[in-house]
Image (cartoon, grey):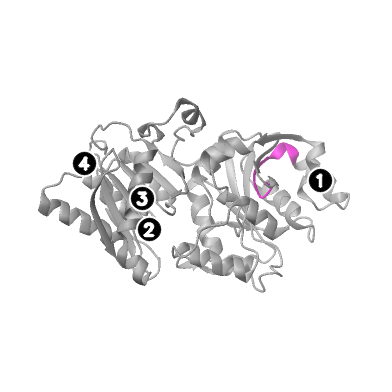
Amino acid sequence: KPVLTSGCGTGITFTLETGGREAAVAPVPAVAPEAVFRLMEELARQADNYRNHGGIHSAAVGDGEGNLLLCAEDIGRHNTLDRIAGEALLKGIDLAGRILVTSGRVSTEMASKCARLGIALVASRTSATDMAATLCHEAGICLLGYVRGGKFTVYTHSDRLLVPEQAAASLPAQVPRGRIPGVTGVILAGGQSSRMGSNKALLPYRGGRFIESIHRQLSEYFDEVIVVTNTPEQYEFLPCRKVTDIHEGMGALAGIHAGLHHSSNPAAFVVACDMPYLNGGLIRHLASMADPGGVLIPESPTGLEPLHAVYGKGCLAAIEATLLSGQRRIVSFFGRTNVNRVNVTQVAAFDPEFNSFRNINTPTDYYRLREIERGEAQPAPADERAEASA
């Protein structure tokens, strides 16, 4: 079922029509990661037009052993799948239970088409949208992203992967879909954006504005979303509550305090407005362990990530005391409350590249983000990002 959206010109999202039956692919043997890597490497070898001209997407279908069956290139990533489906029909090749590898982002259209074709596993060189992950979860499709350098991110149905026992233990469990009860999503839209030179929350991004993308993601996870800003008139286009700092001029810590104070729930997941690669699985994992009495904070290779953490209302008094003492650093109040950490290994199970914590501070960051979105560049590893920011 196509649904028209307000995207750039003719935006469309898709849902599955199951007709009263559960959408699922035919039972197939588990797939070894080596088969996925082999197909992705073969796709790169077959992509002649991309090597010669650039600006072209490619996709291929293979079997569970990693043998390539069909391959297509086209300007549009959706067209590559249509070409493969058409060629399979003409040649009498059954696509049920096959593996699809693609150079482009996996969106709802791609996920819906794969479900109708009976594809068992979809692997992308780049990312997948949260709604595409929802469709793949419902359809029983294993969805992988960022298949690069012998690694990938698992979005759905890790049970369809044949991996060694020690590797399987680190894979994230299937996180329940739907909205997360008892937690509010808080977006911090404050800050001067002095390094960017303009309000980065309002920069063009994916057919809208940066903060719209963050709000759209959080709205899929939480019943309540709040934007903390001292200029609420700039965000009237967002269909959510806007609140201002109670302690003005005290930075992000004051923003966390305001969001938590105004939250209708006992805990709040807090994120900055310039973090484009939020990981739904990681957010759900953190929210499921929310401590109403303290802080739950993830760690990356560069340290704690306080602008991607869950704060309970029980730490409001500690934040208040810290702000009144003139301290602005977020970690300043940690000694006054209960703090639980989600270590690097646990985070990596959901986000191996730690892209969740990437933010956009300068015009260079923004232009690189656009290049990554177009498939012309790859995100820098976490340790390189740390050196650059230092």
Q: Closer to us: mark 2 or mark 1? A: 2
267 displayed left or right of 136 = right
Secondary structure under the numbered disc 2 in the rendered image: loop
Q: Earlier in the sequence, mark 2 or mark 4?
A: 4
Q: Earlier in the sequence, mark 1 or mark 4?
A: 4
> Which of 122 and 68 lies nearest the eye of the viewer?
68
Q: Quadrant of the C terminus?
A: bottom right
On residue 40, which mark appears? 3
Q: Closer to us: mark 3 or mark 2? A: 3
Q: Amino acid at mark 1?
A: Ser
How dense is the environment of label 2, judged by Cα within 10 Å: few (below 14), some, or many (20 and up)?
Answer: many
Q: Which residue is mark 2?
A: 104
Q: Which residue is mark 1?
A: 332
Residue range highlighted in magenta: 305-315
253 displayed left or right of 271 = right
Q: Earlier in the sequence, mark 3 or mark 2?
A: 3
Task: Note whether residue 244 is visible.
Answer: no
Tag count: 4
| Residue 386, image x, y percentages | 68, 54
How dense is the environment of label 4, judged by Cα within 10 Å: few (below 14), some, or many (20 and up)?
Answer: some
